[in-house]
Image: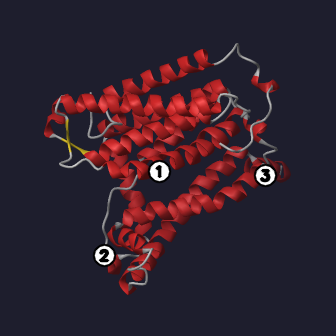
């Protein structure tokens, strides 16, 4: 009896989803533990002025003005990056074909079309909000942020699509039906993106080793107001579903990367050059405090996904079974 229980427990620990879940939990815990030390160390660098001049001066300024919540984010990202290699090795992938990813002959057209569709429709919606007075432009439009925003959008699109729609969805597809795999991974994607820590400024002398876990408590509190959860979480869930469907339909990550990068680009560019107005309160739940909250943004996301699906139909010859295609290199 004890032997059978031991074997069952051993098989459970060998499950791919247990490994991914353990990776996420360990990342959050270690990130919370690392955050206070990262914060104290960087603030000490600022206090000593070691990089206050020269080519690293912009980094000095960023370290000086960033709140503790930003350091918490960066600590989690550092731990997540370091943990990817042992995670991938433990999953024993034989290649991208294991994840149902194959070479895409339309890759450059897909990534371009996805970016234009996502950013175009999001900014068009934002222009409508400006016309209705729900948002107002900044006194001076900062077009100089475009290269930085574009670089961020491309990096986020590649990294998150490789992880969520590449590795995570690929693992789920090996163990469950496509519908449940899409819903599960989209739910995890929405939760992680919705549960962002609020901006918290804490003096260095008040930082304790538990400060990272206090941030986790503030993240938990975000889920106590169901109206906010419904507004922000639902849109993120639909975004995840749209990206997963595009990944399944093309058997590659290029179109999801384009869509994701386009949404990030449009969202950040709009946020950096506009402010919301009190008039928004009269139109809740149709709109919210930014472009990802409200029923109208949700509808725009669905329309963008429908047009991306139409693009797939129009840009390809009669469908060939992707299983017969060549596995795609990990360039995406």
Q: Which residue position holds label 3?
A: 10
Q: Which residue is mark 2?
A: 203
Callout 2 secondary element? loop
Q: Earlier in the sequence, mark 2 or mark 1?
A: 1
> Where residue 238 sits in the image (x, y, percent)?
46, 30
In front: label 2 or label 1: 1
Q: Residues within 10 Å of mark 2 (few under 14, many from 20)?
A: few
In the rendered image, the residue lying farthest to the bottom is 48
Left or right: 180 as drawn, with respect to 5: left
Q: Is 30 placed above or below 282 here?
A: below
Task: Say which of 85 and 314 sits in front.
Answer: 314
Mark with earlier residue (3, 1): 3
Q: Secondary structure at mark 3?
A: helix
The residue to which callout 1 is attached is: 152
Q: Position of residue 328 (x, y in %)?
A: 74, 37
Q: Quadrant of the C terminus?
A: top right
In the image, taking residue 198 as reference, residue 100 lies left or right, namely right
User: How far apart are the two marked residues, 2 and 3, measured between alpha carbons?
Assistant: 46 Å
Instruction: Indicate the secondary structure of the residue bearing disc 1.
Output: helix
Q: State whether residue 117 appears in this view.
A: yes
Residue in front for this viewpoint, 203 or 109: 109
Q: CA distance from mark 3 to mark 1?
A: 41 Å
Question: Which-is-in-front pick, marks 2 and 3?
Answer: 2
Residue that appears at 44% across and 74% down = 56
Could you tell me if residue 241 is visible in this image?
Answer: no
Neighbours of disc 3 within 10 Å: few (<14), some (14-19), many (20+): few
The percent position of residue 74, horizontal first and vertical second, equals 48, 62
Q: Is residue 189 above or below residue 177?
A: below
């Amino acid at each position: 009896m004890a032997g059978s229980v031991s074997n069952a427990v051993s098989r459970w620990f060998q499950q791919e989803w247990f490994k991914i879940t353990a990776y996420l939990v360990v990342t959050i815990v270690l990130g919370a533990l690392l955050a206070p030390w990262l914060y104290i160390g960087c603030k000490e660098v600022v206090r000593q002025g070691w990089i206050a001049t020269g080519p690293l001066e912009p980094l000095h300024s960023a370290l000086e003005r960033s709140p503790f919540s930003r350091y918490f984010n960066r600590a989690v990202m550092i731990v997540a990056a370091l943990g990817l290699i042992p995670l991938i090795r433990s999953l024993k992938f034989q290649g991208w074909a294991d994840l149902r990813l194959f070479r895409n002959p339309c890759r450059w057209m897909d990534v371009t079309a996805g970016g234009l569709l996502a950013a175009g429709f999001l900014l068009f919606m934002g222009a409508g909000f400006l016309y209705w007075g729900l948002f107002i432009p900044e006194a001076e439009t900062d077009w100089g942020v475009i290269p930085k925003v574009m670089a961020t959008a491309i990096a986020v699109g590649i990294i998150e699509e490789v992880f969520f729609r590449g590795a995570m969805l690929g693992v789920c597809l090996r163990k469950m039906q496509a519908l449940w795999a899409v819903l599960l991974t989209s739910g995890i994607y929405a939760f992680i993106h919705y549960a962002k820590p609020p901006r918290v400024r804490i003096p260095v002398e008040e930082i304790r080793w538990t400060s990272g876990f206090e941030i986790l408590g503030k993240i938990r509190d975000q889920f106590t107001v169901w109206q906010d959860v419904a507004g922000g979480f639902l849109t993120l869930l639909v975004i995840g579903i749209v990206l997963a469907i595009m990944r399944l339909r093309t058997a590659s990550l290029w179109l999801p990367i384009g869509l994701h990068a386009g949404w990030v680009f449009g969202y950040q560019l709009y946020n950096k050059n506009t402010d919301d107005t009190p008039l928004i309160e009269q139109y809740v739940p149709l709109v919210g405090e930014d472009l990802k909250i409200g029923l109208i943004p949700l509808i725009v996301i669905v329309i963008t996904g429908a047009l991306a699906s139409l693009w797939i139909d129009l840009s390809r010859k009669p469908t060939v079974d992707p299983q017969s295609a060549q596995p795609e290199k990990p360039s995406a």
